[in-house]
Every structure is written in structure tokens, then in C-alpha cells.
Amino acid sequence: MAAQPSAKQLELAYTFFNEIGIIAQLSATRMQRVLPHDLTQSQFSVLNWFVRVDVQATPGRLARAFQVSKGAMTNTLGKLSGKVFVTVEPDPASGRRKIVRMTPSGRTARDQAIAASYPALQSLLKDISSEGIAEALPLLQEVRQILDAARYETEVGPS
């Protein structure tokens, strides 16, 4: 069994994740300002998920992936469907389930959103080196993979 982390290690981990949270908030706000097609950050994230993870999903799978309620995901998918960026169709294998797929125009909107973020990224690269980003990326990917794998485990905390 591994030794319990020290108070100093716990404080360091807290500071690390606090910085990630602040960066996430600041970058999401910056991205939201440049998103085309009146996309929200959550709508863009769903489109990006289809490119990164899978070409189709059920609304429930997407809700679990984004850790939001099924109702919240249904609302996001309804707006994306209204923009013709996704299709939501009955699953032929089940009378109740739906299958969601990104449309070609959804892929175009996602690509345009990423391109719209380039000026902000160019500005950032004036102050931080791409080498520094490349050095930090493996650790961030490892943390994401650990948290992603643990997302369905039962949370343990104070009673």
C-alpha cells in the first residue's frame, strides 16, 4: 500500500488543479468570444467530442462523457440539431434510444471554431514558448487519462 501523501504534497496537488481550473475558465471565456454560428462552449465541446472520440453516440453516453444531466445534454443536442450540426435519430436496434451523429456542416463549424481561436493562440505564443507547452502536455494528458478512468468510480470523501 502506498504511503499517504503529506500535507505539503496535498497542497501542491491542490495548487496544480486550482491553476488548471483557472486556466480552463479563462480559456473557455476567451474561446466563447470567438465561436462562430452562435455556438456555446458546450455545443462546441460536443462537436469536438465527435472528432476526438467517436462518430456516433447516444444522448446518455454524451451526458456521461460531459458529466451533465440527460436533460442538459438533450437541450444542447436540440440546439445543435436546429443548426443542422448533428442529427438525432431513433436507434434501429432499440425503440427508445436515439443515435446522435455530427453532420458535415457540424464538422465544418467545429473546424471554423478552432480556426477562430488561432489569433488568441498566436497572442499567447508571444508570451509562452511552444516548447514549454510541449513539455507540459504529457503530464496534462496523463492527468486527464487518470481522471477520465476514475470518473465512474464511487467518490470517497468525508462522511
Image (tube, rainbow, N blue to C red):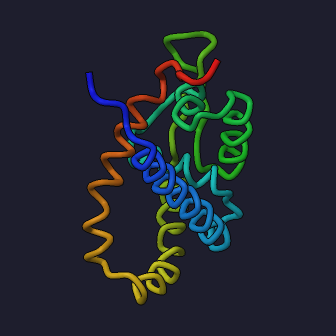
- Residue beneath the point at 37% across and 37% down: 5
Q: Is residue 13 left or right of residue 41?
A: left
Give above or below for 122 relative to 109: below
Percent x, y for residue 64? 55, 29
Q: Quadrant of the C terminus?
A: top right
Q: How many marks?
A: 0
Percent x, y for residue 130? 30, 78
Give above or below for 134 relative to 6: below
Give above or below for 25 relative to 61: below
Percent x, y for residue 11? 48, 50
Q: Quadrant of the N terminus?
A: top left
Of residues 120 and 52, which is closer to you in this image? Answer: 120
Of residues 66 and 113, which is closer to you in this image? Answer: 66
Of residues 139 and 11, which is closer to you in this image? Answer: 11
Name the residue furthest front. 7
Percent x, y for residue 61? 53, 27
Q: Give residue 88's quadrant in the image.
A: top right
- Residue beneath the point at 51% across and 69% down: 112
Q: Is residue 99 left or right of residue 56?
A: right
Of residues 152 and 157, which is closer to you in this image? Answer: 157
Q: Is residue 159 left or right of residue 142?
A: right
- Residue beneath the point at 65% across and 34% down: 68
- Residue beneath the point at 30% across and 74% down: 132
Give above or below for 88 relative to 127: above
